[in-house]
Amino acid sequence: MSLLKIENLSVSINSQRILDNISLDVEKGEITAITGESGSGKSMTAFAVMQLLPNGSFQSGKILLSGLNLPSLTETELCEIRGNQIGMVFQEPMTALNPLKTIGNQVAETVRLHRSVTYFEALEIAKATLNRVELPPENFPLSLYPYQLSGGQRQRVVIAMAIASKPKLLIADEPTTALDVTTQAQILQLLKDLVDDLNMGMIMITHDLAVVNNMANNISIMHKGKIVEKGPAEKIFTEMKHPYTKMLFNASNHKVNLPKQNTNNPLLEVKNLSRDYVLPRTKIFSKPKIVRAVNNVSFTLNKGERLGLVGESGCGKSTLTRALLGLEEIQEGEIRVSGGVVSKNNETSFASKKNMQVVFQDPFGSFNPRHKVSKLISEPLFLDKKIMRKDDLNDLLINTLISVGLSADDRNKYIHEFSGGQRQRIAIARALIVKPEIIIFDEAVSALDVSVRAQILDLLANLCKTLNLTYIFISHDLSVVRTITDKVMVMKNGEIVESGKTENILTNPTHNYTKKLIEAAPSLPAFC
């Protein structure tokens, strides 16, 4: 008998069908991956298994956990199962962690919810569980708070909470999306080890097919609430039949053709850039500790060149980016754009700032939801305090929207009316409207579905052809960096440890750190 058996499950919310007659099995000691684009029903399937469906929902079919039909149970009975027999790991650990409680208390709390143990006994179990997820108490005391941990460490705490009661089934919903490649590899290996050691079944929900390839025993492909294809991982990868499955794999392995960069005209020059941070005092009379986040960084970006910047979280990429944008003070060095000084001695001119624009990872978070697209895109123009005729402004708005694949009518809509990919196009339009010399893309495609990501990459390639775009592309995804950049810089501990042509660096790295990044990155099978 399967550990989890879903039979003909359908879910409707306010009469809208979300899941349509889906069936799948999860076995002990195996990982079943559910993959597909946003809105396909992946997370709703997980919520159905947990019986945490929103108000107004109607479900039919069976969800059998060790033969027990979960929809037929009372809420009291389900509370005994959630966190005890079924654990769940979420994408963003800070949404699952209480910032006001220590990590020891939070893990202990989950233990005491399902086991009749004293507080101190629960703390001992918490200590052992945190040690199991590679957070040994001698290095990570139970008294630490979530803010004192890195993203990967916080995710380990969430995993510890999910497995503290040794559940039969573990559901991992996009558990590595926001992590760098080495931390991602560590978390994925940890999850695999836990499945093997505890003989759990696991549902892995992800849109990253490279992760699926490295993790799953079985795969279910979801599209518009239906499972369109399922089977053993090796069979799905070699014998995919459904057009949607083929589209997903093609999009995951999408390549673009960048135009050749023919000029040797330096546009951005960074010389001996350093940035220090002063940490808070640990004792009243102690000297504050100074940390060098960026150390003596120098590089040149030519006009029409596309530069990739890679490295683990905390390596200094964000600090360097903020310094380039004039948002961070620098202690040493100089930044020049088109021969003019952008930043020197902590002074940055607005005229030089506008020559560099940025596109963030989360476009929705960078927009005011109360304003229409026309105002959102044109806002950078007004910061320059230049007066434009209304007709000229309107023409500029329309032309900019069309250049990123949107329509003139979109300028009268609000940001919530657009999909994630469309929002990212609007973010790119906002960056383009002031005709900057350089655009910085900060994890601009990491949160997008593979098909939408492919569309944005095609858009960037087209803009490179039409506008001779020059940009710095920051990403953890080495496969994207490989196809969308000409050069790459590898950053570690605030220093550039290796740089050169992208294909050369990612194919034949010389630095051990670069080799480590490439080895950690998940990959699709060669035949896909």
Image (spheres, rainbow, N blue to C red):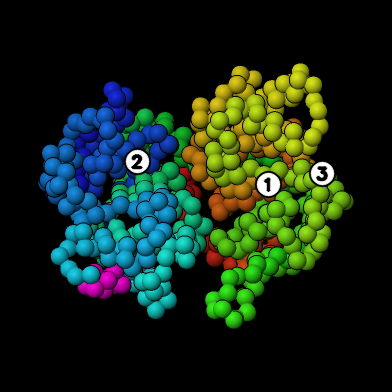
Residue 475's place in the image compared with 159, above or below, is above
Few, some or many C-alpha atoms within 10 Å of disc 2 (few <14, some 14-19, many ≥20)? Answer: some
> In the figure, residue 106 lies in which quadrant?
bottom left
Residue under label 3, please give it: 351
Q: Nearer the viewer, mark 1 or mark 3?
A: 3
Observer-nearest of 333 and 23: 333
> Do the residues bearing badges 1 and 2 touch, measured as CB atoms within 8 Å?
no
Specify whether residue 20 is in view. no
Q: Amino acid at mark 3?
A: Ala
Query: Which residue reaches farthest front?
Result: 284
Residue 134's place in the image compared with 436, above or below, is below
Q: Amino acid at mark 2?
A: Ser
Horizontal side of 413 relative to 329 (left or right) equals left
Q: Amino acid at mark 1?
A: Ile
Q: Position of residue 343 (x, y in %)?
A: 80, 56
Residue under label 1, please give it: 440
**Alpha carbons under labels 1 and 3: distance apart:** 17 Å
Few, some or many C-alpha atoms within 10 Å of disc 1 (few <14, some 14-19, many ≥20)? Answer: many
- The residue lying at 24 percent from left, 48 percent from top is 26
- The residue lying at 43 percent from left, 43 percent from top is 207
Is residue 127 one of those drawn in magenta?
A: yes
- The span picked out in magenta is 120-128
Instruction: Give the structural element (helix, strand or loop) at label 1.
Output: strand
**Alpha carbons under labels 2 and 3: distance apart:** 46 Å
Mark with earlier residue (1, 2) = 2
Residue 120's place in the image compared with 392, above or below, is below
Q: Position of residue 124 (x, y in %)?
A: 26, 74
- The residue lying at 63 percent from left, 79 percent from top is 287
Mark with earlier residue (2, 3) = 2
Specify whether residue 325 is in view. yes
Horizontal side of 346 relative to 231 (left or right) equals right
Residue under label 2, please give it: 43
